[in-house]
Amino acid sequence: MTELAGLEIRQLRVSFDGFTAVDGVDLDVHPGDLRFLIGPNGAGKTTLVDAVTGLVRAEGSVLFGGDELLGRSVHRIARSGIGRTFQTATVFEELTVLQNLDIAAGAGRGMWTMLRRRRTVPESVARTLETVGLTELADSPAGTLAHGQKQWLEIGMLLVQDVRLLLLDEPVAGMSHDERQATGELLQRISEERTVVVIEHDMDFMRSFARSVSVLHAGKVLSEGTVAEVQADPQVQEVYLGHTAAEATADVTVQEA
Ligand SMILES: Nc1ncnc2c1ncn2[C@@H]1O[C@H](COP(=O)(O)OP(=O)(O)OP(=O)(O)O)[C@@H](O)[C@H]1O
């Protein structure tokens, strides 16, 4: 069984040419949490995840299971059990679902061994196929999967690597209602054994599945708590309602023109 680990972020700061995208963020994600990071465009959500995964230089401290991540290379951070997905799925389209999982699982094995059609499927891969609901499609080329199924495959590729922290960037963008529901249930199952952080703009999805929420705004944590607590926070209402009201006005103006 994978050992649960959480994140302790302190005074995280990321600047690009004098512009501060993440501005002194403190954030605790408890082991086994299903944390949603929400906030308007440009709030700093992706940059925060980039800092945790070593893609951008950052100041401050990021402890994962008690170990400092800042200053480590992207590869070392990945090896410490942290995996992420991006907004567009990055699977090998010509290879089958099983081969994609095999490659993800098989760091250190030869390419030929991985691509050879196997008689038996390793137990961890079989279990992952079940978890992400792709057992029936194991031999289908990944390129033929529906959009939602590709996202699940990508999540599966993190699971076979036995990551302890999954950082997912808008996993349900472009998904149908049923795919969203299935993804939410998948994330709940995964977070029984691992820690999950989801960047999300879909508020209905967040309300249905978040165990805890952090709201980012202009590089800072504006609010944090349960869905109910965050929704009741006047500062959050102001950021979101202000935003929506401005957009609604803009829409009306455009329509009238
Ligand atoms: N490489 C970069 N160079 C310069 N500015 C950047 C860079 N990456 C991000 N930014 C800026 O940092 C700010 C935060 O961006 P970020 O992508 O983290 O926000 P976000 O909350 O993820 O937004 P979205 O919800 O639109 O994805 C934005 O103003 C963005 O333009």
Image (cartoon, grey):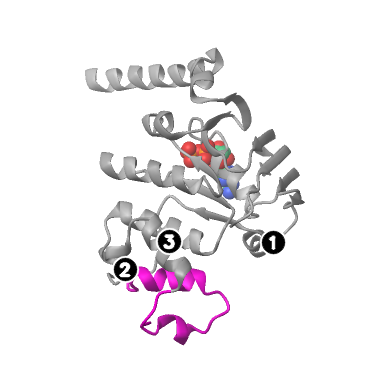
> Per the image, is 106 magenta?
yes
Who comes first in sequence, dot 3 or dot 2?
3
Q: Amino acid at mark 3?
A: Thr
Left or right? Give the position of 69 relative to 47: right
Q: Secondary structure at mark 1?
A: loop
Callout 1 environment at 10 Å: few (<14), some (14 to 19), or many (20+)?
A: few
The segment highlighted magenta reads 93-121
Residue 79 in sight here: yes
Q: Is residue 61 above or below residue 106?
A: above
Check disc 3: other Cα within 10 Å, few if <14, some if 14-19, many if 20+.
many
The percent coordinates of residue 64 (x first, y second) are 69, 49
- What's the residue type where badge 2 is placed? Ala
Q: CA distance from mark 3 to mark 1?
A: 28 Å
- Closer to the camera in the image, 130 or 91: 130
Mark-to-mark CA distance, 2 and 1: 33 Å
Labels 3 & 2 near each other (Cβ < 8 A): no
Residue 90 is at least partly visible in this image: no
Which label lies toward us, 3 or 1?
3
Q: Residue at x 45, y 17 (%)?
A: 242
Q: Residue 17 shows which numbered tag?
A: none
Furthest-left residue in this view:
256
